[in-house]
Amino acid sequence: MTTRWQSVFILIICLYGCSSVPFQKTAYVPLQTEDPWKLVEHFSESSPADFQVMNTIVFEYNWNKFSAIGYIYVDTVEKTFRVVCMNPMGVKLFELSGDKDRIVPHFVLEQFSRKGNFAVTVGEDIKRIYFDLIPSADARVSSRRHKVTFSEPAGAGTMEYIYAGAGGYLVEKNYYEDSAMNWGISYYEYMEKNGRIYPGGIILNNYKYSYSLTVRLKEVQT
Amino acid sequence: MRHSKTFIISIFIILSLFIAQASYSAGEGPKGGTAPTGEAKQDNDMRDLLLQLEKQVSDFQSLKTDFTQTKNLAVFRNRIIMKGRIYLQKPGTVAWHVDEPLKYSVLITDKLIRQWDEDADQVQEIPLSKNPMFRVVIDQLTAWFSGRYVQLLDEYTVSAKKTQPLQIEFIPRDSSSVKKVIKAITITFREDRKYLQKVQFDEVSGDSTSIIFNNTEFNAPLKNSDFEVKRRV
């Protein structure tokens, strides 16, 4: 009986999980190239070195959700970013900038700053999403017909990059510690603008702290 | 609940900005008698003007208006434009619907706050009894839309910048807690001075926000659907 109820519970969780992804699932097709590093090279060449976009972001924590509008500038070469986030009525929630080593809060709504080091948490998520989307040359490669997975040591754990889909673009970036996924990012619905590709949807799941971010690309600004 | 609270506080802040700011320091700010004599005369003249405006602006029971909100962020060259509608039914029901760039609705009554946005796609209801500060917000919101401007003299130095159309600038007094955030608020009235045409917030950070009101109608019959907060497509 317990097993049955457990199955029902798992099914509900799965259904919830499936329905909560608001983006078109990447179609796993046979990859065009035999050489995994060609995929990485092509992805790197297609990605913008620096860009400014407007997103909407849904923060989800403990079954509560709230939405925000984010403006972000990212320089992936210099590894710098600047972000301003506001609620749908136009109230600025926070403004941060950062680089690979530090995060500078320029403004954080008092209610956010009361909850631990909010700026660092947000800044780290931005870096996870937008920086280091390419594995290093030493990464271990696992090729399959529909996807290529690269993994390499990172910090106290392992970083995993999965490239798949018609374009062979990055579809997942996952971080594991002690064989458990600490956080994972999924990239969906790549679109092209001015010869560069941008993911139309991004979902970050932080399993360690049980929250998620759903990012929808609204506008690429030139 | 943590995020709900954050959101409530966010709404509170923007409404506070939109409305009157007077709630920031009811009883804290300098009262009329504390201002220097020269300023006192100016304040008296302005008080007369604001009293006159109050009479002109407050003569309605319901209101609906479109708005275009433009936010200039000092660190980005692009502007953020938000468009939507506001419905107000005295004595204290306000619906705020954003249509672009994100569909979002919030209803504020004397009993509850109800909100929804297209991305979260979840209607959240927050009873006002648990958030007494919202009572203040509603009072303030009604005061602003109803044109009770005289109370702003406690918190701001008020001066007329233009007469055609009438444009009034509110600069936070040194003692005002708002001064840390707001450099100036400028409101522009319609030609008939019955209502606002534009509100502009200039922030100390260099950011600015303007809200332009269009198609404003007084005492137009409002539909129940105007105050509905539910899934929109």
Image (cartoon, rainbow, N blue to C red):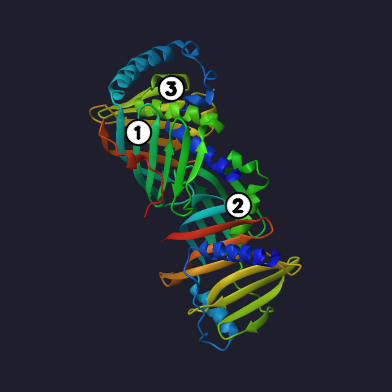
Asked where in the image residue B62 lies, by quadrant, the reply is: top left
Where A190 falls versus A221 (above or below)?
below
Q: Which amino acid does label 2 sit on?
A: Tyr
- Tell me the residue that label 1 is attached to: B88
Q: What residue type is labelled 3?
A: Leu
Residue A176 appears in the figure? yes
Q: Do labels 1 and 3 share a chain?
A: yes
Percent across and percent down for residue A208 are: 69, 58
- For label 2, count other residues whose C-alpha is less than 10 Å away and answer few (under 14), some (14-19) or many (20+): some
Seen from the viewer's position, the closer of residues A171 and B204 is A171
| Residue visible at 65% across and 63% down in the picture | A5
Q: Which mark is residue B152?
A: 3
- For label 1, count other residues whose C-alpha is less than 10 Å away and answer few (under 14), some (14-19) or many (20+): many
Cα distance between the residues tagged 2 and 3: 39 Å
Percent across and percent down for residue B4 are: 55, 43
In the displayed orientation, state which residue is furthest to the left.
Answer: B192
Host chain of mark 2: A
Seen from the viewer's position, the closer of residues B206 and A6 is A6
Host chain of mark 1: B
Q: Is mark 2 on a helix, strand or loop?
A: strand
Q: Which of marks 1 and 3 is nearer the N terminus?
A: 1
- Please name which of the two marks, 2 or 3, marks the residue nearer to the observer: 2
Percent across and percent down for residue A88 are: 45, 46
Q: Do labels 2 and 3 share a chain?
A: no
- For label 3, count other residues whose C-alpha is less than 10 Å away and answer few (under 14), some (14-19) or many (20+): some
Cα distance between the residues tagged 1 and 2: 33 Å
Seen from the viewer's position, the closer of residues A138 and B141 is B141
- Tell me the residue that label 2 is attached to: A61
Callouts 1 and 3 close, C-beta under 8 Å: no
Q: Determine whether, in the image, residue A65 is placed left or right of residue B224.
A: right
